[in-house]
Amino acid sequence: MSEPAGLELAAVTKRYGRTVAVDGISLRVPAGTYCCLLGPSGCGKTSTLRMVAGHEEVSDGDIMLGGEVINGLPPARRGTAMMFQNYALFPHLDCLDNVAFSLKMRGIGKADGRERAHRMLQLVEMDAYAGRLPAQLSGGQQQRVALARALITDPRILLLDEPLSALDPFLRVRMRAELRRFQKDLAISFVHVTHSQEEAMALADLIVVMNGGRIEQVGSPREVFNAPSSLFVARFIGGHNVIEDGPGATGGAVAVRNDLVRLVDAATLGGGGPGDGEIRRSGRVAGIEFQGSVVRVTVAADADLELTVDVAERAFFDNPVGLGDPVVAAWKPEDAHALTGGSA
């Protein structure tokens, strides 16, 4: 395989007429990193990926791979490979010829190309299916063939456009474990576009949260989850209560993880006074969802604030509450993370 290469974007912008899809973003992805571009539809993540691949032109700024500016190079000369959302396998070619196709286009002889394709199918554990057509494969098997076809060009970085979105939930979990294993074994960077917070958390060394064509936050999964930088990140990542004008954030907002909020019977606290220094909000139970290991309880604290409390399953059923019951949601001041920037 090629030597791994770092990716750098310097003030990269993409315009479609008067519409700015990507707005002057700068980013460094170290060599050998699994990076997820995460955000809602229309945030600019796929346009960014396509500019790196060479399938979209850069309006302004530079893209560098291994220190070389690649803006003006055609896709085949960039050292990148792209795995598309729909896999884009040729329906009339068997797996072996699908994988060997890009080598054929580069003028490599048929025998050599097929031998290398066989080795690549072995890598993704699909050599037993070499003679099958794509229609004869499951979704997960098609994904492995598409991965082999991308990797056979010996890229310095692999680009993946929502590669798991077409799979059922069970297979999606299995395939993301395989993608992670392939990335570690190959030791090259993977840049993976997704709108799934769970997927990004499970796969990434580095998460890049995008919104409105800009980067809201860059960090490890743990950093992004425990310390969201803005209202948008806290709400999009999920698992947090966002409290505007909250205690500990002068004139701003705070985020408190759902699992760090405890649920207390209102009668036990005599109305929920501050007493021991905890921050407390009184309210009534507005929703209860059993989610296996936790029970998610929604507390309507006032007309404008609903709090979510994730209670351990056993603890909830030891002291259950019902819809409409008066309760208090309580948390420690140090568990409230101030949100200092970005949009809602």
Image (cartoon, rainbow, N blue to C red):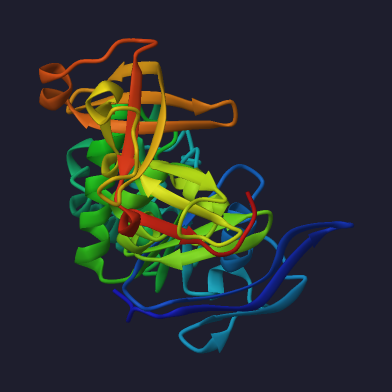
Q: Position of residue 70 (x, y in %)?
A: 60, 80
Q: Quadrant of the N terminus?
A: bottom left
Closer-to-camera residue (322/259): 322
User: Is residue 178 left or right of 192 when viewed as pictured?
Assistant: left
Which of 265/112 is in front? 265
In the rendered image, the vertical position of residue 100 relative to residue 58, given as above or below? above
240 with respect to 123 (left or right): right
- Near-viewer residue (125 or 220): 220
Q: Position of residue 202 (x, y in %)?
A: 29, 49
The picture quadrant where one finds residue 295 is top left
Q: Residue at x 42, y 80 (%)?
A: 6
Count of residue discs: 0
Front residue of 230/242: it is 242
The answer, for residue 298, to whether it is visible in the render is yes
**Among all residues in the image, which is located at the extreme top?**
323
User: Which picture quadrant has residue 21?
Assistant: bottom right
Please name the residue shown 64% across and 54% down the image: 343
Is residue 160 visible in this depiction of the protein?
no
Residue 180 lies, in percent from the top left, at 25, 55
Residue 116 found in image quarter:
bottom left
Furthest residue to the bottom? Answer: 67
Residue 298 horizontal/vertical position (percent): 39, 24
